[in-house]
């Protein structure tokens, strides 16, 4: 390859494809806003119907991960559901052997990150679930089913949105 071939117009980058990329990105963001909002509003509505707080901060982060990076291991249903359940279990285990508080919560968050990685169900937002369990000590028989149901709702909303809206990659890439 000669130096001239690198500087001639035929070797230049085709800019026609990027001409509208800003608009495409904006459209994708608006579409994403709709999908994430639908997922979170579904959790809020479910909570209103059953008079329980179903929408917790880690689930909002999960909705963002599932939408923004749907092909990643962290966004797959297995990681979303098991990540949060493992975090809750670790939080309750910590409460059984130690006092709740910020030090215990920090350790549970870090251990959750390690355990979910080792078990190949990485899901960073789940770390916050463990922290919430330690700091708030919700009743397990009440909290865990709500948590599992909310995680399933997030996954199903994303799954349905990729089937109904054009331009989305299919989600999930694998169910379990």
Image (spheres, rainbow, N blue to C red):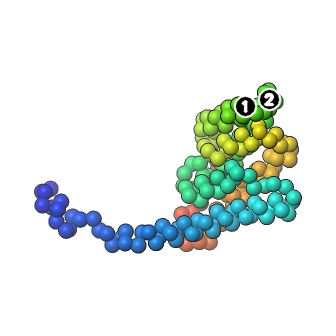
53, 4: nearer the viewer: 53
Q: In the rendered view, does 168 fall on the left or right side of 6?
A: right
Q: Label 2 to label 1, Cα distance in Å?
A: 7 Å
The residue pinned by badge 1 equals 104
Q: Are marks 2 and 1 in contact (CB under 8 Å)?
A: yes
Tell me what residue is drawn at x 13 percent, y 57 percent: 3
Residue 14 visible here: yes
Residue lying farthest to the front in this orientation: 102
Q: Is residue 80 above or below residue 44?
A: above
Q: In the rendered view, does 153 fall on the left or right side of 142?
A: left
Which quadrant, please, contains the N terminus?
bottom left
How crowded is the residue under tag 1: few (<14 C-alpha within 10 Å), some, or many (20+)?
some
Picture coordinates of residue 143 (x, y %)?
82, 47
Q: Is residue 97 above or below residue 67?
A: above
**At numbered mark 2, what does the secondary structure look like: helix, strand or loop?**
loop
Tell me what residue is drawn at x 81 percent, y 59 percent: 47
Image quadrant of residue 164? bottom right
Picture coordinates of residue 167 (x, y %)?
52, 70
**Labels 2 and 1: the sequence-earlier one:** 2
**At numbered mark 1, what does the secondary structure look like: helix, strand or loop?**
helix
The residue pinned by badge 2 equals 99
Picture coordinates of residue 146 (x, y %)?
80, 52
Picture coordinates of residue 25 (x, y %)?
48, 67
Tell me what residue is drawn at x 54 percent, y 63 percent: 169
């Amino acid at each position: 390859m000669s130096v001239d071939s690198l500087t001639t117009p035929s070797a230049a980058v085709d800019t026609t494809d990027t001409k509208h990329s800003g608009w495409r990105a904006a459209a994708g963001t608006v579409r994403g806003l709709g999908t994430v909002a639908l997922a979170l509003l579904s959790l809020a509505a479910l909570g209103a119907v059953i008079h329980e707080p179903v929408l917790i901060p880690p689930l909002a982060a999960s909705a963002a991960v599932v939408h923004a990076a749907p092909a990643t291991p962290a966004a797959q249903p297995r990681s979303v559901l098991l990540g949060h359940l493992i975090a809750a279990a670790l939080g309750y285990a910590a409460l059984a052997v130690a006092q709740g508080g910020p030090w215990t919560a920090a350790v549970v968050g870090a251990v959750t990150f390690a355990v979910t990685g080792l078990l190949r169900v990485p899901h960073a937002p789940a770390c916050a679930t463990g922290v919430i369990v330690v700091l708030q000590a919700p009743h397990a028989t009440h909290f865990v089913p709500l948590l599992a149901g909310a995680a399933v709702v997030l996954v199903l909303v994303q799954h349905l949105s990729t089937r109904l809206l054009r331009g989305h990659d299919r989600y999930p890439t694998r169910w379990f």
